[in-house]
Image (cartoon, rainbow, N blue to C red):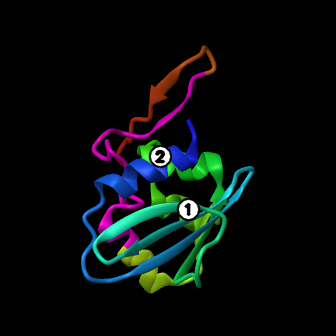
Amino acid sequence: MNVRTVLSDIARRLQPGPNSLVLHFDLRGGPKLTLLVADGRADVHDGWVGEATCRIRSSVQVLLDVIDGRRLASLAIIAGDLMFSDLTQMVQVMELGIIPMQAQHAYDAPRCANPRGGTTRIRYAPST
């Protein structure tokens, strides 16, 4: 999956308010991209355009996993795999839905690798 295509799809579906954002995506293993949100429009540009209100650093795979809901943004932030240069802008990015606050299936129990192949649901037992 191409990260530019994913961001373009997000920009097309985005319903921005009156605020303007200039997000620079600094992606390890991928292109430098700008998501420009202004005047009720959102566009993706190759390279860095304008002065960033927030720089988002991550690897391509982590960003795609967070956007697709396979990984929680909060856990990626805590682990240092997803970094924002401005925390107030981070909240705005998440409120707009550019990067989701929670996984698509947050109600599902977490999964872990099964030694026999596939994944296994982790079951939580009450502590005694």
Tell me: residue 112, above or below residue 105: above
Main SS of the magenta part reads: loop
Q: Amino acid at mark 1?
A: His
Q: Which residue extends farthest top?
A: 116
In the rendered image, residue 121, in percent from the top left (x then y), is placed at 42, 30
Numbered tag placed on residue 69 in the rendering: none
Taking the image as shown, residue 35 lies to the left or right of residue 117, namely: left
Q: Residue at x 66, y 65 (%)?
A: 47
Numbered tag placed on residue 45 in the rendering: 1
Q: Which residue extends farthest right?
A: 29
Which is more foreground, mark 2 or mark 1? 1
- Residue 108 is inside the magenta segment: yes
Quadrant of the frame with the N terminus: top right
Q: Amino acid at mark 2?
A: Val
Taking the image as shown, residue 113 lies to the left or right of residue 90, namely: right
- Residue 111 is inside the magenta segment: yes
Which residue is identified by label 2?
6
In the rendered image, residue 34, in percent from the top left (x then y), is placed at 56, 67
Tell me: residue 66, above or below residue 112: below
- Evaluate whether residue 128 shows in this view: no
Q: Residue at x 28, y 72 (%)?
A: 40
Q: Residue at x 59, y 16 (%)?
A: 117
Find the magenta span and give its range: 93-114
In the rendered image, residue 76, in percent from the top left (x then y), is placed at 55, 59
Nearer the observer, 121 or 104: 104
